[in-house]
Image: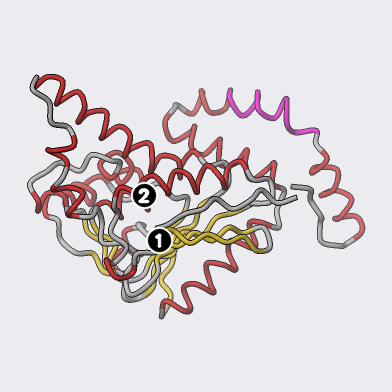
Amino acid sequence: MTTALPSLATISLSLSESVAELRLNRPDRSNALNEAMWQELRTAMRWADATPEVRAVVLGGAGRNFCAGIDLAMLAGVAQAVAHADPARSREQLRRLILDLQDCLSAIEQCRKPVLAAIHGACVGGALDLVTCCDMRYAAADAVFSVREVDVGMTADVGTLQRLPRIVPDGVARELAYTGRNVEADEAARIGLVNRVFASPEELQVGVMKIAQAIAAKSPLAIRGTKEMLNYGRDHSVADGLNYVATWNAAMLMSADLNEAMAAAQAKRPPRFAD
């Protein structure tokens, strides 16, 4: 039985044919990340991680833009939110706030299921932090990306500076972070920020869903293990990664999924994997 969908105010969530679709849903504010949306992103991703029927996730945005970054009203209210008579305690509280926002986005990376970002229109500031957590990024031709934090006088602090240099060349990441300039969809594909560009938001949605469905048709256990190994390998040496995957497969290799894949190949039929 499918786990009940969580009740969310700023994100629409649906599940069909093993693919969960999350859509940032504040179109009147270009899906700017207010306090509720930060928290609901974590809630939605933890639900996707914990729900066996979910095999892949597509993350998009309602309206004209994917996401305009952090809601400026939220940013303006930070000083009041962390106010304390003792400056040290105020700064400690600010640190805890930043760590919590980081965790809200890291929940995307920590989800065991692949997360595909479908990006159209603006993807700036905190939105870029968000999509760098995803496994893959796809764009419509109208997509525009920028690391915008430098333009409001702050250092990006919820993931872009840590993840972007692992997606695009280091010098490119530095240029984008130092200048805050716009990157249009074609350049984003050229530098490796996105996997592919689609002609329109409609084609983007159809195309990304097809990719997600192709992933969902694979062995769920193998997909989850593959994501685990790719994330681990990014942050560790080759030797560490090889040792970990040997340990993983010592436990997970001999599985019902392996038996089903072999039986399906012999019978020349599509495999049917349990969740």
Q: Residue at x 46, y 59 (%)?
A: 59
- Tell me where residue 93 sits by quadrant: top left
Q: Residue at x 49, y 38 (%)?
A: 110
- Residue nearest the observer in this picture, 156 or 246: 156
The three-letter amino acid code for the residue at tag 2 is Thr
67 falls in the magenta region: no
Q: Tell me how the rendering is colored.
A: secondary structure
- The magenta-colored residue range is 244-254
Is 129 on the left or on the right of 221, as rendered? left
Badge 2 density bin: few <14, some 14–19, many ≥20, Cα 10 Å: many
Q: Residue at x 62, y 38 (%)?
A: 225
Q: Is residue 221 above or below residue 213?
A: above
Q: Position of residue 235 (x, y in %)?
A: 42, 31
Q: Is residue 260 above or below residue 118?
A: above
Q: Is residue 140 above or below residue 33?
A: below
Who comes first in sequence, dot 1 or dot 2? 1
Is 248 on the left or on the right of 273, as rendered? left
Q: Position of residue 124 (x, y in %)?
A: 24, 59
In this view, the mark in front (1 or 2) = 1
Q: Is residue 19 above or below residue 49?
A: below
Is 67 on the left or on the right of 255, as rendered? left
Element carrying mark 2: helix
Q: Which mark is residue 24?
A: 1
Q: Which mark is residue 132?
A: 2
Q: Residue at x 40, y 69 (%)?
A: 62
Element carrying mark 1: strand
Q: Position of residue 89 (x, y in %)?
A: 15, 20
